[in-house]
Amino acid sequence: MKRLAILALLAGTPAIAQTAAPQAPASTAPAGPTAIVFSEKSANGFSDLPMGVHRIPDSNVIVSGHQGGSALGVLFGVVGMVVQSSVNAQTGTTKVRNVEDDLRFDVRAKAIELTNAALAGDTFKDAFTVTPQPGGSTMTVTPYVVLTFVKKTEDVRPYVVLKTKVAVDGDSGKAIKYFCCEGKALPLASLTENDGAGLKALLTSELETAVNVMLLDRSKPFPRNDEAKIATNGMLPFVGKPLKWRGFDLGRYKDYNLVEFRGGMIVFSGVNIVEPGALEITPVVKK
């Protein structure tokens, strides 16, 4: 229980076992193309984000990884968690106060642009459309950015996130998130040079990768094999230091590993698009 409580503070979510009940696989696409709609909302503060994050005003950019790991929230229950969250959010504000303008990125506009480009080719033209059809299925996509500070440094790992839900015949469907981070952690100062040009280029590259993985999985779902359990160790979205966590191997996209972490209340649950060497990944052998 002690370990679970610590993980809850790190991820800002209720303590639950790593072997949570499997998520249902992405639904098989119904007849006819699925319309893609990009939400104007940002990440949900209750279900998508840990406590203590900082939201950069007028953007879908979230700052995390700076949160303290004190036991205040555990000692004082829900009220204590709220107090600790306020303290942590202020820490995040302080870290980026002078460079917020350089960290802004219109992730929704860029996601729409890249999705339209992907749909213009032959791969997805029959599976998706940008025009909602009466009685047809609709996939709502909520894009946002998570800038994760590495503990005790000024280095940052930028992630793009695509939260998706496919609604069919009044059923809103289950959410599947797609996370992508490319390259090593970089100093905040280098990411904000030239009005954040380097950060914007990196996020655009990550977003293109995430969009293609999303379209692949939501058109022809990757196999979800409950026996394909793996152990991972390394940096994960929102968390400022390496974390050991168990997930499921969904295969590969180009040279990326596709790792699904399950458990709806875990903020990094979903399909994590992992560069070679970014995580230590080992198969879990049945005893």
Image (spheres, grey):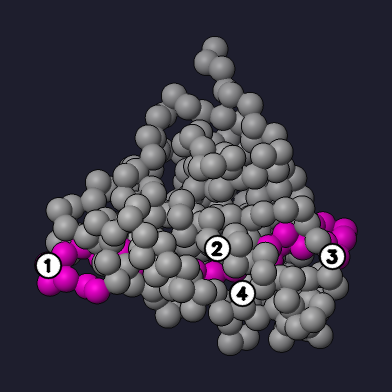
Residue drawn at 55 percent across, 63 percent down: 207
Quarter in which the C terminus is drawn: top right
Residue under label 3: 187
Q: What number is the disc on residue 135?
A: 1
| Residue 281 image point, x, y percent | 64, 32
Residue drawn at 63 percent across, 26 percent down: 282
| Residue 204 image point, x, y percent | 60, 67
Mark nearest the camera among 1 and 2 is: 2
Earlier-in-chain disc, 1 versus 4: 4
Residue under label 2: 207
Does residue 195 appear to the left or right of 228 in the view shown? right
Residue 4 appears in the rendering: no
Mark nearest the camera among 2 and 3 is: 2
The residue stretch that appears in magenta: 131-158
Residue flagged by tag 1: what amino acid is it?
Gly
Secondary-structure class at tag 3: strand
Give the camera-side residue of 247 and 129.
129
Establish if 278 lies above or below 188.
above
